[in-house]
Amino acid sequence: MKRNDANQFQLRTPSPRDFPASCDVCIIGGGIIGAATAFYATRANLKTIVVEKRAGLGELTTSASLAAFRAQFGDAANIALMRESIAVFENFRAFSGAEIDLRQPGYLFVTTARDGYEKFGARVEMQRAAGLRDVELLSGDDARKRFAYLAPAITAATFRAKDGWLSAHELTYGFARTSGARFFLETNVTNWLKQGARVVGVQTDRGEIRAQNVLLAAGPFSIPLARMLGIELPLENVRRQRLAVKAHRLIPRDAPMTIDADSGAHWRPDGAGAVLGWSREESPSAAADFIAPDWEFPAVVLDGVARMSPFWNEIIPALKKNDLALVAGQYTETPDNNPLIGAHPEIAGLYLNTGYGGHGVMASPGGSRICIGVLTGKLRGAENPFRVERFTDDAARAKEKMVL
């Protein structure tokens, strides 16, 4: 698709002479979602400015991600979203020239439940019906033959070979450079510009940006930015942590992402080492530039992954603190664990691309393509399963049912 000649890639801290600025769409947030949205916006011939308050792109939640992707989801909408996104990753070098260190050793879900094979079988049947035909259903014995590090107690597994991980940093900058958009770094949004009930731009600490549309893609900071407009989005932030373990001879370097479906604890190789995660229950927290990790988490997550991969029990006793690197970030979650994508139902000119709940890297191409499709009118609201008003629609239906 031809790019608007008005778009010329810039990535810098703007000077006073850059303001006042104007554009077709101003994107707030320079993480993976903001960069991907800019890519699709410029391909729709929209003059685009991205505002990021930090000195670089992808320095908040994107940098704390495990940077993994999978198409193995439990509903057709997410399966379609992820299949589209993975196709972009697989062809990223061809259209961008950027290397994203794409690796596809697969995703392996395992369970020790007595009825695990039946439950996994039903899930795989649904996934295949939704077009994901390359998911494999394995018995516990078959899983151990394929992946010898698995525990004897495992009763079933599912595996898809084309799932995997990549470099979130390279993906973010690849989208940004290929977009041709202007990225204003170290630029903080301080207020919204409105004309009646319509958003017409943003005020920043460096100057004013006028825009036909403003698109909120600020991850955890989407909540306080929306409150500046007097709206409460159906979002909350929760802390999530990622543990990296240095190289060890017992870590299988060719293993897939391995997930204990019973608990959620997961690990994947990272070179000769590994990265681990576990989305355990935490209380919601306010958006923050720094999220302090909990140094009890390494012991907890290592114990969690050892249940399904017992080789960790041999590694754990020898680990020292300098063998570990722990970082924390925030998931921005919705009540149904799906993102908010599209036009805000009450404020004209405001669009949202946020609330991915830890799936931002893997869903960034598909979600951003949908968002710009809605903005340009190429995609009708009802065709977007992640539309913002689905929550108000659900509430209205529930109220009507109570009345009846």
Image (cartoon, rainbow, N blue to C red):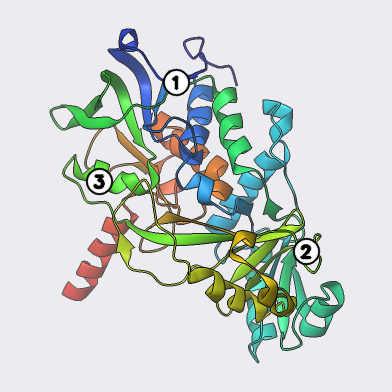
Identify which amino acid the numbered label 3 is placed on. Pro
| Image location (x, y in percent) of residue 163 | 70, 56
Query: Is the C terminus in the top left, top right, bottom left or bottom right quadrant?
Result: bottom left
Q: On the picture, is 279 further left or further right than 153?
A: left
Q: Secondary structure at mark 1?
A: loop
Find disc 2 in the rendering and name its residue. Answer: 255
Question: Considering the numbered disc 2 on the image, is that residue within a helix, a strand or a loop?
Answer: loop
Most extreme residue toward the bottom is 114
Q: CA distance from mark 2 to mark 1?
A: 42 Å
Q: In the displayed structure, would residue 328 be above or below residue 231?
A: below
Q: Is residue 268 above or below residue 365?
A: below
**Residue tagged by mark 1?**
46
One can see residue 264 in this view: no
- Identify the residue at horizontal 78%, vertical 63% (top origin): 255
Q: Mark on residue 224?
A: 3
Residue at 61%, 45% (x, y): give it.
85
Q: Position of residue 17 (x, y in %)?
A: 32, 7
Q: Is residue 17 left or right of residue 363?
A: left
Q: Nearer the viewer, mark 3 or mark 1?
A: 3
Circle 3: element type: helix
Camera-nearest residue between 52 and 24: 52
Q: Earlier in the sequence, mark 2 or mark 1?
A: 1
What is the C-alpha distance between the residues marked 3 and 1? 27 Å
- Residue kind at label 1, given as amino acid type: Leu
